[in-house]
Image (cartoon, rainbow, N blue to C red):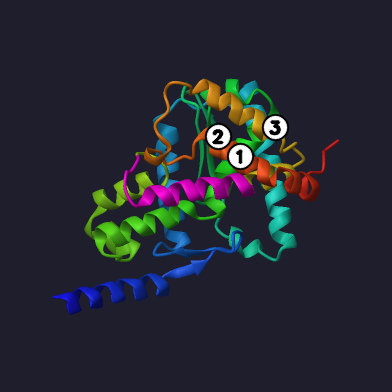
Amino acid sequence: MKKITLMLLAGATMFSVISCNRNAITGRNQLSLVPESEVQAMAFTEYKEFLSTNSVVPASSSDAATVKRVGNRIIDAIKNYYNQQGLSAELQGYSWEINVVNNKEVNAWCMPGGKIVVYTGLLPVTQNDASLAVVMGHEIAHALAKHGSERMSQGLLQQLGGVALSTAIANKPAQTQNLFNSAYGIGTNVGLMLPFSRKNELEADRYGLMFSALAGYDPREAISFWQRMAKASSGAKQPEFLSTHPADETRIAELNKIMNDTYTKYYRPVK
């Protein structure tokens, strides 16, 4: 029995190693069972469904204009950066789109392929373009770092034995849909995936800060924004070990560690 267990563990380890890819932007090896083209196709379908069932703010409104102006500057900065680094192929399949929805929740997200949503409830907390850029850069960084695909791969391995995404969709569509929703923040998990999620959050903070700075927004606004977030969520926070997000104090401390380097290397104010 012990021998069989060891063989299974060895097989699982070998499977994970074989299924790992190095992320082009972070340089980190990730479990990768989900082809980017397939997850983008799922994301585009889900995004269209989301927009059809939520109140989208008209493009003519000042809120929508602000969000799209900030978002497009970040997208342009990312395209330029990827081109300079010889990584333009990594953006293949991206069809960038930005929408604002009427929702009091303080939230924003970016799906694979560049499908972005900002909730109106976020804007009273961001208060200015630079803070909004920090949040949008963070959410876009999640997509570029393929954090959702990584988490979905973990779910496929844990729940469905590591089958291919196409096989999972064909055989267990409802379960695959739940994995997609969980991987991209619709729902929470308490278990082995939580530490990875907090790590991904801090990774998105780092690259999101860089992207906002490259777009000409002062990255130092990130500290003020997260302090406002901490104040807004006071009394309603879970312990850090039960949350997929790092504690506000942890996030601010980590941002302060990289702030001077980010400001010096990447911040170029736009006139």
Coordinates of residue 111 in the picture (x, y in percent): 49, 46
Q: What element carries label 3?
A: helix
Q: Is the magenta stretch mostly helix, strand or loop?
A: helix
* Residue 253 numbered tag: 1
Q: Is mark 1 on a helix, strand or loop?
A: helix
Coordinates of residue 264 in the picture (x, y in percent): 80, 47
Tag nearer the camera, 1 or 3: 1
- Residue 120 visible to an observer of this rendering: no
Q: Name the residue under label 2.
A: 249
* Residue 221 numbered tag: 3
Vertical side of 61 occupied by 25: above or below: below
Coordinates of residue 4 in the picture (x, y in percent): 18, 77
Foreground residue among 230 and 17: 230
Residue under the image location 70 percent in, 66 percent down: 86
In the rendered structure, does residue 195 fall within the stretch colored magenta?
Answer: yes
Residue type, label 2: Glu
- Residue 118 visible to an observer of this rendering: yes
Which is more N-terminal, label 3 or label 1? 3
The boundaries of the magenta stretch are 188-207
**Gap in Å between the C-alphas at discs 1 and 3?**
14 Å
